[in-house]
């Protein structure tokens, strides 16, 4: 297993492309909707021809951040759309509401959180890519012959 990691990382990927792949995986891994990132990362990797093991590794590394950022994304999203404070959903409240109302409220809250995530994710991907690329170029297994000489 340990011997296969460098092979997976080198699958025709330049250090810059690998940095972009890891940045996208990490950003998508922070989407404030549980269960979405793994499938979205796989779809992005296949569509954009990114390194699938690398994007999923970054996605899984982001899981603790995903959980920690759900509430801040919901709050920021609520401020962005001027929705006001999000009502508390206690067991008593949920019992009185119809399933349609619950789904409607949860969809609205998720949409607000996704808006906030999107505004943060785009610059985050750029920043992570720019920061990670020089570090990945220093790894001999990833650097091409011209990059080792630099």
Image: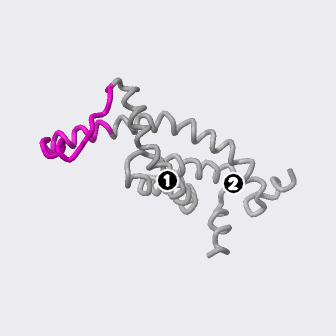
Is 127 left, or right, of 40 in this rendering? right
Rendering colour mode? one colour
Quadrant in which the N terminus appears: bottom right
Helix, strand or loop at disc 2? loop
Q: Main secondary structure of the magenta part?
A: helix
Image location of residue 139, percent across then percent down: 76, 59
In front here: 7 or 60? 60
Please give the residue where the numbered disc 1 appears in the rendered image: 64
Numbered range of the magenta stretch: 83-109
Magenta includes 123?
no
Please give the residue where the numbered disc 2 appears in the rendered image: 14
Image location of residue 22, percent across then percent down: 59, 52
Q: How many marks?
A: 2
Q: Residue furthest right?
A: 149
Give the residue displayed 18% in from the left and 44% down from the top. Answer: 94
Magenta includes 85?
yes
Instruction: Give the answer, above or below, for where 3 lies relative to 105.
Output: below
Give the residue displayed 51% in from the left and 55% down from the top. Answer: 59
- Whether label 2 touches label 1, CB < 8 Å: no
């Amino acid at each position: 297993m340990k011997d296969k990691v460098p092979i997976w990382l080198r699958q025709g990927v330049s250090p810059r492309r690998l940095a972009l792949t890891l940045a996208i995986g990490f950003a998508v891994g922070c989407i404030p909707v549980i269960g979405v990132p793994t499938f979205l990362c796989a779809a992005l990797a296949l569509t954009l021809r990114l390194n699938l093991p690398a994007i999923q590794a970054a996605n899984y590394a982001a899981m603790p951040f995903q959980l920690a950022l759900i509430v801040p994304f919901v709050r920021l999203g609520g401020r962005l759309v001027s929705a006001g404070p999000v009502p508390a959903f206690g067991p008593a409240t949920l019992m009185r509401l119809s399933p349609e109302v619950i789904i409607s409220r949860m969809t609205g809250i998720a949409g607000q959180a996704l808006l906030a995530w999107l505004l943060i994710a785009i610059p985050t991907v750029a920043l992570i890519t720019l920061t990670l690329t020089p570090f990945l170029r220093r790894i001999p297994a990833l650097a091409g012959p011209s990059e080792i000489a630099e």
